[in-house]
């Protein structure tokens, strides 16, 4: 197939329970830990951790698709990008109401500092909920 | 001599049993298919993770990082064993093979103290009756294992390893080979052994974060994945073992029914012959 097509990038997004994306894409935006990375074919090899919650956007066949990605790692090579996601959901599959509710709950949890809540976990959950809402919209 | 009616009753009872075992076989076959699909669906993640781990270990595995709790090698004095059995039986030697392997594991690591994390009722019941250190047990979660559950099980073991409370982590479970055969697998999860076959093509990566920092994030996930995979494999191989056991039971029932029917017909014939003789000899006497 077009595996050797220099215009395209082989994007794989794998979650623990299934593979979500296995496609030839022309462009992908990856929510890396230190900021979003735009990747085009021919990118230099790169390994990075991902944000605990972020939106991955890719363009395949002229269509733009969004995924909420909840942490993990990415490996970029010249012709491929592999995302090892701790969890991921297609934007189109996320229920908006549920995501909004999750965001509200997460925001509330993150505000209640001092108490027995794990602050880092609460912040991560907030990011994840934001990513879900963003990907769903 | 049992009478005809007794035979009829026994045959009916065996037929009922056969119907049950046949139904159980069908149920297992359906569940097996689903379980197999899940095993296959989870494969790319484990594969990708192994490759990234190999990469990162190569990058971070220099001497200066040997102090990291994840990379340092300690003499295995305390070992954590995660054993995954099934909750229910009726699967032939599935659990007894596993338990035998567990006992062997104890023999092989005589010098070490072994701490158990048990998933599945059969394993728990076995070790509860014996002197052993059980850290935790999880029952009734193997119906449809999720990644979150696997992560929950792995969490305490990961913490213990990081804090140096244990020196090695093993996972023991049945692995799905084919419908007819299961393979026992004893996997050393920690300390990390990166197999030679996964050695990547040397890539000059840009590391966005320190390789060691990434490795320290990745290794706990690796343990979770190992547990998750073991759970999925267990479910698939359990359903396969159960299917095979129920198939054998059904065909045994068929044999029993055949033998009983044959016997019953003999008895019936004997009764008829006896009656004829009585009639004939009665008639002869009356002449």
Image: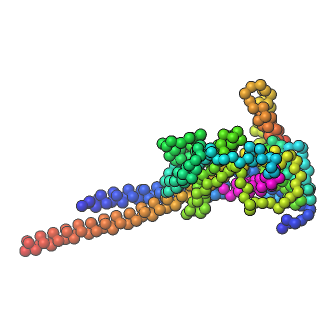
Q: Is residue B187 above or below residue B252?
A: above
Residue B152 lies within the magenta run: no
- B59 to the left or right of B149: right
Q: Classify the position of the N terminus of chain A by image quarter.
A: bottom right
Predominant SS of the magenta segment: helix
Residue B217, given in percent of the width and then of the height, sits at 77, 45
Residue range in magenta is B39-60
Residue at image coords 61%, 62%: B177
Q: Does residue B140 appear to the left or right of A76 in the view shown? A: left
Q: Residue B138, position in %: x, y?
A: 59, 42
Residue A85 vertical position relative to residue B286 in the rendered view, above or below: above
Residue drawn 74% across and 62% down?
B197
Exactly how many numbered labels are in the figure? Answer: 0
Is B41 a magenta residue?
yes
The outermost residue toward the top is A114
Q: Residue at x 80, y 40 (%)?
A: A128
């Amino acid at each position: 197939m077009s595996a050797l097509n220099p215009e395209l990038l082989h994007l794989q997004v794998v979650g623990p329970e299934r593979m979500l994306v296995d496609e030839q894409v022309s462009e992908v935006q990856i929510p890396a830990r230190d900021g979003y990375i735009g990747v085009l074919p021919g990118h230099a090899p790169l390994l990075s951790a991902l944000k605990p919650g972020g939106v991955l956007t890719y363009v395949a066949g002229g269509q733009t698709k969004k995924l909420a990605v909840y942490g993990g790692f990415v490996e970029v090579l010249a012709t491929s990008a592999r995302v090892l996601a701790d969890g991921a959901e297609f934007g189109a599959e996320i229920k908006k109401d549920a995501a909004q509710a999750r965001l509200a709950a997460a925001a509330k949890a993150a505000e209640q500092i001092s108490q027995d809540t794990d602050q880092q976990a609460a912040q991560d959950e907030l990011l994840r909920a934001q990513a879900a809402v963003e990907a769903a919209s | 001599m049992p009478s005809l009616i007794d035979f009829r009753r026994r045959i009916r009872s065996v037929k009922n049993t056969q119907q049950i075992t046949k139904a159980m076989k069908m149920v297992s076959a359906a569940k097996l298919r689903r379980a197999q699909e899940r095993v296959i669906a989870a494969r790319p993640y484990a594969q990708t993770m192994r490759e990234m781990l190999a990469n990162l270990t190569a990058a971070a595995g220099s001497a200066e990082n040997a102090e990291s709790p994840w990379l340092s090698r300690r003499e295995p004095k305390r070992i954590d064993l995660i054993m995954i059995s099934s909750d229910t039986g009726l699967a032939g030697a599935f659990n007894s093979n596993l338990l035998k392997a567990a006992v062997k594991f104890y023999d092989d690591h005589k010098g070490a103290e072994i701490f158990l994390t048990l998933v599945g009722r059969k394993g728990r019941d076995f070790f509860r009756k014996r002197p052993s250190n059980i850290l935790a047990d999880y029952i009734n979660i193997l119906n449809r294992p999720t990644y979150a559950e696997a992560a929950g099980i792995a969490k305490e073991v990961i913490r213990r390893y990081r804090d140096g409370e244990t020196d090695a982590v093993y996972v023991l479970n049945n692995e799905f080979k084919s419908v007819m055969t299961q393979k026992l697998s004893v996997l050393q999860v920690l300390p990390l052994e990166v197999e030679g076959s996964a050695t990547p093509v040397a890539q000059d990566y840009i590391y966005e974060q320190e390789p060691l920092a990434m490795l320290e994030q990745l290794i706990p996930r690796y343990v979770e994945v190992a547990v998750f995979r073991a759970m999925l494999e267990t479910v698939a191989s359990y359903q396969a073992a159960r299917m095979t056991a129920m198939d054998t039971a059904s065909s045994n029932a068929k044999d029993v029914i055949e033998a009983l029917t044959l016997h019953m017909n003999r008895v019936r014939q004997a009764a008829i012959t006896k009656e004829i003789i009585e009639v004939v000899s009665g008639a002869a006497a009356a002449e």
